[in-house]
Image (cartoon, helix red, strand yellow):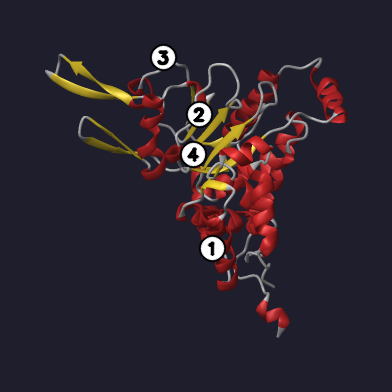
């Protein structure tokens, strides 16, 4: 009877073989940062956008470019700067003298995988250009709506907000990112390994030799498998309690929205699939919750002054709720 209950309902063999191939390719180029790579894979499976934060030089952009290289889909890169205008990102209407009318010329945002480098260096006016496309996968210019081609994913990097020339992203935009991945410095052993690997090689040559592992139809198929994974009612209640607690916690000025609850469901399903399971466990939820919530909550000024971090508070909230078994 027990074997019947836990028998695999969804065949995840092909998906897991692909994930193993991705990890092998990435591991040859990027030393360490395994958690960042796993979260990026989960973001692809969960159809979510990803924000990567870290100081310059910790392979944020390299990881994003490498992930795009592994996917057989269109890729574009946009470098955000303080003078960037919305039309530089979305595109603009250009007069065509042959037809005596205006034609829309699509901007670099019209791609499958869009890498936005240093997203927090552009002002609010340019940031607002991303609101519609990140949520609805479409762009409206001059009253005409242009749907994006699937798959569509934004991989954005940013420097910590206390660095020179950065703008804090609007809460509404942060809420549209499935994950915020915080990338730390490598350990001493990892840094020695980086130096050994790369003192005689060039990242450009390594990237040029990367073979495609994922196609657009593959991604669509894997996402459908992930959506169909089982998550029990008691786990949905566990997620709801975590998110609800962020709204009632006295240490928080702003709690998470229902979009955060949905994001935890999608992300925990993706992690379960990556582990070869067709059902979600409480451990999957505990694993993804900090990455889903850390950019969606705002600490009170008093708690920030005390040195409390979002991750520490999220850990306290999760530990205060009984884990369902």
Q: Earlier in the sequence, mark 2 or mark 3?
A: 3
Q: Which mark is residue 240?
A: 1
The CA distance from mark 3 to mark 1 is: 41 Å
Q: Visible in this render: residue 126?
A: yes
Q: Residues within 10 Å of mark 2 (few under 14, many from 20)?
A: some
Place of residue 102 in the rendered image (x, y in percent of width and height, measured from the top left): 18, 21
Place of residue 174 in the rendered image (x, y in percent of width and height, measured from the top left): 49, 39
Q: Identify the secondary structure beneath mark 4.
A: helix
Discs 4, 2 touching: Cβ within 8 Å: no
- Which residue has dot 4 on it? 174
The CA distance from mark 2 to mark 1 is: 28 Å
Residue at image location 65% in from the left, 30% down from the top: 210
Place of residue 92 in the rendered image (x, y in percent of width and height, measured from the top left): 28, 22
Instruction: Name the image quarter holding residue 101.
Output: top left
The CA distance from mark 4 to mark 3 is: 21 Å
Q: Earlier in the sequence, mark 4 or mark 2?
A: 2
Residue 147 lies left or right of residue 165; in this view the side is: left
Instruction: Name the image quarter holding residue 320.
Output: bottom right
Discs 4, 3 touching: Cβ within 8 Å: no
Q: Nearer the viewer, mark 2 or mark 3?
A: 2
Q: Is residue 231 above or below residue 272?
A: below
The CA distance from mark 4 to mark 1 is: 20 Å
Q: Residues within 10 Å of mark 3 (few under 14, many from 20)?
A: few
Q: Is residue 202 above or below residue 216?
A: above
Which quarter of the image is occupied by the N terminus? Answer: bottom right
Q: Residues within 10 Å of mark 1 (few under 14, many from 20)?
A: some
């Amino acid at each position: 009877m027990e074997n019947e209950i836990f028998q695999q309902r969804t065949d995840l063999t092909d998906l897991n073989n692909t994930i193993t191939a991705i990890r092998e390719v990435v591991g040859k180029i990027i030393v360490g940062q395994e958690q960042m790579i796993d979260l990026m894979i989960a973001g692809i499976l969960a159809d979510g956008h990803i924000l990567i934060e870290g100081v310059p030089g910790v392979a944020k952009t390299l990881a994003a470019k490498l992930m795009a290289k592994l996917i057989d889909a269109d890729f574009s890169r946009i470098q955000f700067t303080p003078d960037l205008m919305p039309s530089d990102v979305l595109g603009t209407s250009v007069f065509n003298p042959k037809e005596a009318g205006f034609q829309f010329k699509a901007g670099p945002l019209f791609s499958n995988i869009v890498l936005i480098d240093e997203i927090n260096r552009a002002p609010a006016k340019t940031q607002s250009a991303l609101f519609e496309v990140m949520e609805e996968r479409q762009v409206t210019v001059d009253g005409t709506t242009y749907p994006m081609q699937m798959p569509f994913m934004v991989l954005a990097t940013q420097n910590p907000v206390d660095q020179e020339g950065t703008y804090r992203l609007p809460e509404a935009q942060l809420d549209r990112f499935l994950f915020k991945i915080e990338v730390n410095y490598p350990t001493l052993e990892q840094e020695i390994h980086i130096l050994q690997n790369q003192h005689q090689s060039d990242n450009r040559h390594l990237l040029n030799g990367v073979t495609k592992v994922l196609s657009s139809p593959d991604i669509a198929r894997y996402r459908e498998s992930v959506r169909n994974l089982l998550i029990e009612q008691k786990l949905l209640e566990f997620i709801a309690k975590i998110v609800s607690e962020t709204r009632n916690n006295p240490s928080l000025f702003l709690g998470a929205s229902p979009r955060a609850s949905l994001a935890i469901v999608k992300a925990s399903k993706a992690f379960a699939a990556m582990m070869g399971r067709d059902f979600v466990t409480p451990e999957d939820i505990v694993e993804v919750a900090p990455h889903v919530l850390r950019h969606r909550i705002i600490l009170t000024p008093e708690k920030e002054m005390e040195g409390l971090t979002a991750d520490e508070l999220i850990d306290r909230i999760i530990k205060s709720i009984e884990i369902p078994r």
